[in-house]
Amino acid sequence: MRIALEAEVESFLSEVFSILNKFPKGLYIPRRTNSEDKTLNFQIKTGLNHNLIREELLSLTISNYSCTDRDRDLKRKGELWLFGKLLNPPLIDEITEVYIKLKIQQGRVICLLSFHPSEYDVRYPYAGD
């Protein structure tokens, strides 16, 4: 796990925004089949749909960045970028901190395994005080 330089985070977010703005199907949220799908369960419970998740991703800033880690799934490889965000989803009346794990692969933004409430303390190295 590493903390990327500010310029790296800004470059990654710029690429994410470019893909999401240019391609309607530029966001892919995989469904888990071999274990609990926390992202899908959270979407159903809170009313977050694909378009709302896309909007939330487009509002990320460097202050939402937490860290960068290698993808432990040998089939996917590469790096995962972890962000966190406070959300007030449509169907529940409480603000929830969510994990957002992203990677860019084959010209798409992949929102991997995570767009659900945080289970661990998320640190934000560029959030400022």
Image (tube, grey):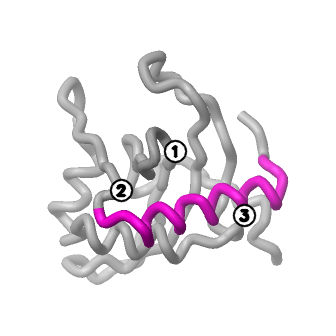
The reply to whether discs 2 and 3 touch (Cβ–Cβ < 8 Å) is no
* Residues packed near mark 1 inside 10 Å, few (<14), some (14 to 19) or many (20 plus): some
Q: Is residue 77 above or below residue 66?
A: above
Relative image position of residue 88 (x, y in whole percent): 37, 80
The amino acid at mark 2 is: Leu
At 66% across and 59% down in the image, what residue appears? 65
Q: Secondary structure at mark 3?
A: helix
In this rendering, the count of numbered labels is 3
- Of residues 67 and 104, which is closer to you in this image? 104
- Does residue 74 belong to the magenta stretch? no
Q: What stretch of residues is rendered in magenta?
A: 4-24
At 23% across and 61% down in the image, what residue appears? 43
The quarter of the picture where the N terminus appears is top right
Which tag, 2 or 1, sits closer to the chain's start? 2
The quarter of the picture where the C terminus appears is bottom right
Q: Secondary structure at mark 1?
A: strand
From the viewer's perspective, tell me whether residue 126 is left or right of residue 20. right
Q: Secondary structure at mark 2?
A: strand
* Residues packed near mark 2 inside 10 Å, few (<14), some (14 to 19) or many (20 plus): many
Furthest toward the front, the residue is 22
Determine which residue is flagged by label 3: 10
Determine which residue is flagged by label 2: 27
Q: Is residue 54 above or below residue 102?
A: below
